């Protein structure tokens, strides 16, 4: 299995060449790719340059994580604007040769009065159906959400995917979110099956969404990696790490040391479970 990291963990340390230099470091550490957080400021008019920088560094763009314009809420004009924003992010992602576009399936639906939730779910499905049909080249991956959110469970996530119905709809497993809903991670993975296309892997204490390095919390990584390797395809292990929680105040050298140690930890477990 390939291993990646959210690019911002060390990117901000290199003034002027932050993105390029951080990729050089990740390649030296034998990472295989990254997840890229999208923002208009970072991406606009740079998509082809980003694609070339990644290619030159020999790194894959496993997934992109855009802002989350919400087309399940608001009036008709607001929802239409949200869909147009998603379409723009989809086009950016294609230009960068991203493998997957991560979608948060409007977890706030459960904050609505019960009589409004069905209509919000309907709008969510209609918006995702439009994106799926209008951009068939892009893989849209639905991420499991935090507790007290819609699509926090495997059943809800699968229901959304089945309602959309497109062949370019898959799943992104967020290991930390699953632990917070007291989920059985191996069972969750098996439920996702061959529609699981990418991951956000991070650890926690089972109480807070801390986004710790694998091995710093309570997840049984050896068991989880064994189950992931049962699935078809080459599902990347993409770390989504909160720098403040894992290395707040640490030097750049220390953060690089943490990255390298965690990559080696995962590689060793993969050898043991293969």
Image: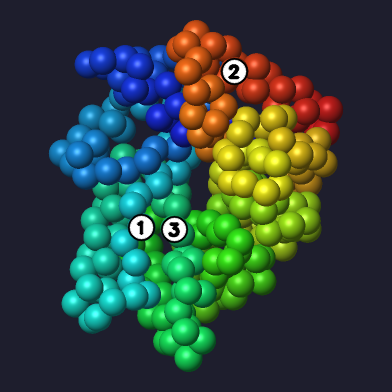
Q: Residues within 10 Å of mark 3 (few under 14, many from 20)?
A: many
On the image, the x and y values in percent for residue 242 come to: 51, 34
Q: Nearer the viewer, mark 1 or mark 3?
A: 1
Q: Are marks 1 and 3 in contact (CB under 8 Å)?
A: yes
On the image, the x and y values in percent for residue 162 come to: 56, 75
- Quarter placement of the C terminus: top right
Mark 1–mark 3 distance (CA, rounded to whole Å): 7 Å
- Name the quadrant containing residue 182: bottom right
Which badge, 1 or 2, comes first in the chain's sequence? 1
Residue 258: which numbered mark, if any? 2
Count the marks: 3
List the residue tagged with mark 1: 68
Say how the picture is coloured. rainbow
List the residue tagged with mark 3: 103
Residue at the spot 47% in from the left edge and 84% down from the top edge = 113
Which type of secondary structure does the marked residue at label 1 adopt? loop
Q: Residues within 10 Å of mark 1 (few under 14, many from 20)?
A: some
């Amino acid at each position: 299995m390939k291993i990646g990291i959210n690019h911002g963990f060390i990117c901000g340390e290199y003034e002027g060449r932050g993105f390029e230099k951080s990729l050089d470091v990740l390649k030296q550490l034998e990472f295989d790719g990254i997840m890229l957080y999208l923002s208009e400021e970072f991406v606009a008019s740079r998509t082809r340059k980003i694609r070339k920088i990644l290619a030159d560094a020999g790194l894959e763009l496993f997934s992109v994580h855009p802002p989350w314009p919400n087309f399940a809420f608001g009036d008709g004009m607001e929802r239409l604007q949200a869909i147009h924003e998603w379409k723009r992010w989809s086009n950016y992602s294609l230009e960068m040769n991203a493998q997957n576009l991560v979608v948060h399936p409007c977890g706030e639906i459960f904050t609505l009065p019960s009589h409004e939730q069905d209509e919000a779910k309907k709008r969510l499905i209609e918006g995702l159906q439009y994106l799926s049909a209008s951009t068939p080249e892009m893989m849209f991956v639905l991420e499991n959400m935090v507790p007290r959110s819609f699509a926090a469970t495997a059943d809800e996530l699968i229901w959304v995917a089945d309602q959309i119905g497109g062949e370019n709809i898959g799943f992104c497993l967020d290991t930390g979110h699953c632990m917070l809903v007291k989920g059985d991670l191996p069972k969750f993975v098996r439920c996702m099956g061959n529609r699981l296309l990418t991951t956000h892997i991070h650890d926690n204490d089972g109480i807070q969404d801390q986004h710790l390095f694998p091995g710093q919390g309570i997840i049984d990584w050896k068991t989880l990696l064994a189950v992931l390797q049962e699935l078809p395809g080459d599902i990347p292990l993409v770390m989504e790490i909160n720098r403040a929680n894992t290395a707040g105040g640490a030097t750049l050298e220390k953060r690089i040391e943490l990255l390298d140690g965690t990559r080696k930890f995962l590689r060793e477990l993969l050898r043991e479970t293969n």
